[in-house]
Image (tube, rainbow, N blue to C red):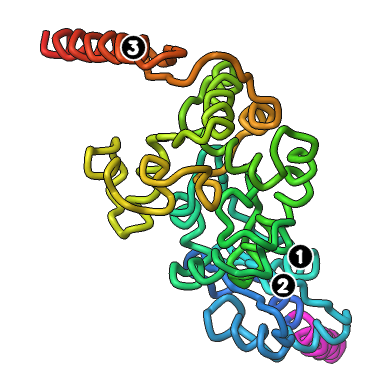
């Protein structure tokens, strides 16, 4: 009986020893990983499986690069470029599965209507280094991709939208995404207007920056179109601000007398005609207004101080409206003081 019991124990021990390698492998695959806090790993273009495996081990995401390499080769893993995030204690199985399923972490970046170059740059700063941004902003190839090879910059050639970005993208790819969206979504809408397409885009950007009220934009565009036809200077305040920023003064404030007087090719107080490029991203309503401007008798407009504008056909009427605007501002200041 004692001999039988001893044999049973030996058999059981032998079975356990035989199972240990398998159990160890299962634990290495399914057990908790070494990661202590959330981690992000970038799989960039041209990265090999060996490089990813070594990076994962080096950054403490997995314990064994060798095991990951064996699994990747057995499964014929096709790496998809992207940004991958891993949670603490993620198992090797979970890490491998996320890469196999290409569960890329995206960041949503919104480029709104009315945004200009400096605003776009700030919104993209985590994906496009500043120096690279300004080089790409003046890329003839990207301007050609947008549909306007004559454009000297990408101002206005970006579609207002929310973009899904990740940090494994190259800066040029990010910018290409923006101009391709413009070419597909905006460029066709510029055809068939009162002006050629690029001039329509420029005029739309002026209307966009002058008023956010869609119902006013055709009238604003009409004033500028009438002035163009008469050979009058547009005297558009937002262009004087744009000239300020291009001159290196990045104060984002209301225009000053020095801005109005600044001799600059973008300042329509100083030069005739439209500025050389758009001055912002126009909305769909502003583009429609520029295509079909409401040209009437009006040659002037000024803010009411209450969110809209007063339009007038003569300088005398305009000066009266300016006086009304100043009185409204004074009234608001008195109310603010209590």
Q: What residue is pinned by disc 2?
A: 81
- Horizontal arrangement in the rendering, residue 115 relative to residue 146 (left or right): left
Q: Residue furthest front?
A: 230
| Depth order, front residue of 92/201 | 201
Please report contact status of discs 2 and 3: CB closer than 8 Å, yes or no: no
Q: Is residue 5 above or below residue 84?
A: below
Q: What residue is pinned by disc 3?
A: 316
Please give the name of the residue rendered at 47% of the width and 57% of the height, measured from the top-left corner: 121
Disc 2 from disc 1: Cα separation = 8 Å
Magenta segment's dominant SS is helix
Please give the name of the residue rendered at 52% of the width and 80% of the height, measured from the top-left corner: 59
- Can residue 5 be seen in the rendering of this structure? no
Residue 305 is situated, as x and y percent measured from the top left of the image, at 33, 15
Please give the name of the residue rendered at 55% of the width and 66% of the height, measured from the top-left corner: 138
Name the N-terminal-most of marks 2 and 3. Answer: 2
Mark 1, other Cα within 10 Å: few <14 / some 14–19 / many ≥20: some
Disc 2 from disc 3: Cα separation = 64 Å
Write down the region rendered in magenta.
1-23
Please report contact status of discs 3 and 1: CB closer than 8 Å, yes or no: no
Mark 3, other Cα within 10 Å: few <14 / some 14–19 / many ≥20: few
Let me know if residue 14 is in the magenta part. Answer: yes
Q: Secondary structure at mark 3?
A: helix
| Depth order, front residue of 8/62 | 62
- Can residue 77 be seen in the rendering of this structure? yes
Q: What residue is pinned by disc 1?
A: 102
Residue 23 is situated, as x and y percent measured from the top left of the image, at 76, 79
Q: Is residue 6 above or below residue 196?
A: below
Q: Secondary structure at mark 1?
A: loop
* Residue 323: mark: none
Q: Nearer the viewer, mark 2 or mark 1?
A: 2
Mark 2, other Cα within 10 Å: few <14 / some 14–19 / many ≥20: some
Q: Is residue 120 above or below residue 49?
A: above
């Amino acid at each position: 009986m004692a001999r039988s019991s001893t044999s049973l124990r030996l058999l059981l021990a032998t079975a356990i020893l035989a199972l240990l390698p398998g159990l160890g492998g299962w634990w290495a695959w399914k057990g908790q990983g070494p990661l202590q806090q959330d981690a992000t790993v970038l799989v960039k273009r041209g990265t090999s499986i060996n490089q990813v495996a070594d990076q994962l081990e080096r950054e403490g995401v997995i314990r064994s690069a060798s095991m990951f390499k064996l699994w990747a080769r057995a499964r014929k893993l096709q790496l998809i470029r992207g940004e991958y995030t891993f949670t603490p204690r993620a198992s090797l199985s979970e890490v491998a599965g996320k890469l196999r399923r290409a569960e890329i972490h995206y960041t949503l970046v919104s480029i709104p209507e009315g945004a200009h170059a400096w605003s776009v740059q700030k919104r993209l700063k985590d994906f496009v280094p500043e120096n690279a941004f300004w080089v790409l902003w003046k890329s003839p190839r990207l301007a050609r991709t947008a549909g306007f090879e004559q454009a000297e910059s990408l101002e206005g050639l970006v579609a207002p939208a929310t973009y899904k970005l990740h940090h494994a993208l190259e800066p040029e790819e990010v910018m290409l995404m923006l101009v391709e969206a413009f070419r597909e979504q905006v460029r066709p809408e510029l055809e068939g207007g009162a002006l050629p397409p690029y001039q329509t885009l420029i005029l739309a950007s002026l209307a966009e920056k002058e008023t956010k009220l869609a119902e006013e934009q055709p009238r604003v565009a009409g004033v500028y179109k009438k002035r163009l036809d008469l050979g009058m200077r547009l005297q558009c305040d937002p262009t004087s601000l744009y000239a300020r920023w291009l001159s290196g003064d990045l104060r984002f404030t209301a225009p000053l007398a020095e801005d109005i007087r600044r001799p600059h090719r973008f300042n329509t107080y100083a030069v005739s005609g439209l500025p050389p490029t758009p001055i912002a991203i126009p909305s769909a309503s502003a583009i429609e207004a520029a295509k079909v401007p409401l040209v009437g008798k009006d040659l002037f407009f000024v803010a009411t101080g209450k969110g809209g504008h007063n339009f007038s056909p003569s300088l005398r009427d305009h000066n009266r409206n300016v006086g009304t605007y100043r009185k409204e501002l004074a009234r608001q200041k008195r109310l603010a003081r209590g």
